Image (cartoon, rainbow, N blue to C red):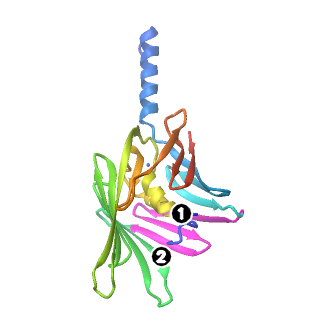
Amino acid sequence: MKTVKILTLCLAGVFGLYSCGSDDKDEKKEEKNKVYLVKSLTISEGGDHDKYTLVYENDRITNITLVDSDGDTYAETFSYPSATSINCKSVDGEGVITMDATGNVISKEEGTNFDGDTYKGVYSFIDGYLSKESWGENSYDTYTWLNGNLTSLKDTYVFEDGEGKEERVTKIEYSDIENNTNIDFYLWLYSGANYAYTIQFMKNVSKNIPSSVKYEEGSPAIISTTLDEKGRPSKMIYDGDTYTFEYYD
């Protein structure tokens, strides 16, 4: 099952009937423009299921908890010592996410490997849209956006011996359904729970709900989406997995 075990790398009336009509319009407009925060995501495949629960404070994630199919629980907490940093803590250790002064790059310390080298993920943004993710010079993803939606992702790996590189391009198509939530659905489908912490800094997510994903080889993989009474995705079926969402109203 394609899931990630919680972040392994450490948003005065007028009168009479006119007043009522105006109030109704205002309420409908407010409802339409409302951004709903994801409360939980359950990923199911066959008899297995993993449930992620998100807790917020002032619209910022302070805790992500995973309960897996075996009943084991994993949790990561987030605190905000400044406007440009996040402290992360889990059973695997502690880390920090920082943003540079321009607001265009965030970096996340992952810890050290057996050689004592520190891994650092670097995320770059253009106009609030995620544009590049890199983990060193040999591995990086680049993101292309069009009309407010993430339309392609290029995964690049450069061989250490200098003998070229491998690239895989993914194309994403979208439905006409507006995304009224705080997450980018394809980025979550692609990155798992590791995507969640970038929500803290991303100003823009795809404005529509994805309908299919196409890799360089093969036919498009259809994303089947069921909406709830407020027009939010309550269930998605993609690549053999079922994603079930709950929201804070």
Magenta stretch: includes residue 116: no
The front one of 21 and 242 is 242
The front one of 15 and 18 is 18
Disc 2 secondary structure class = strand
Q: Which residue is mark 1?
A: 78
The front one of 206 and 24 is 206
Q: What residue is rendered at 41% in x and 35% in y?
A: 33
Magenta stretch, residue numbers: 71-98
**Marks 2 and 1, how far apart at CA:** 15 Å
Q: Nearer the viewer, mark 2 or mark 1?
A: 2
Residue 184 seen in this snapshot: no
Furthest residue toward bottom: 115
The front one of 166 and 69 is 166
Categorize mark 1 by other alpha carbons within 10 Å: few (<14), some (14-19), many (20+): many
Residue 39 seen in this snapshot: yes
Left-right relation of 64 to 169? right
Q: Which residue is mark 2?
A: 110
Picture coordinates of residue 191, whole percent (x, y): 46, 62
Furthest residue toward top: 16
Q: Quadrant of residue 209?
A: top left
Q: What residue is rendered at 55% in x and 58% in y?
A: 62
Q: Residues at badges 2 and 1 in contact (C-beta under 8 Å)?
A: no
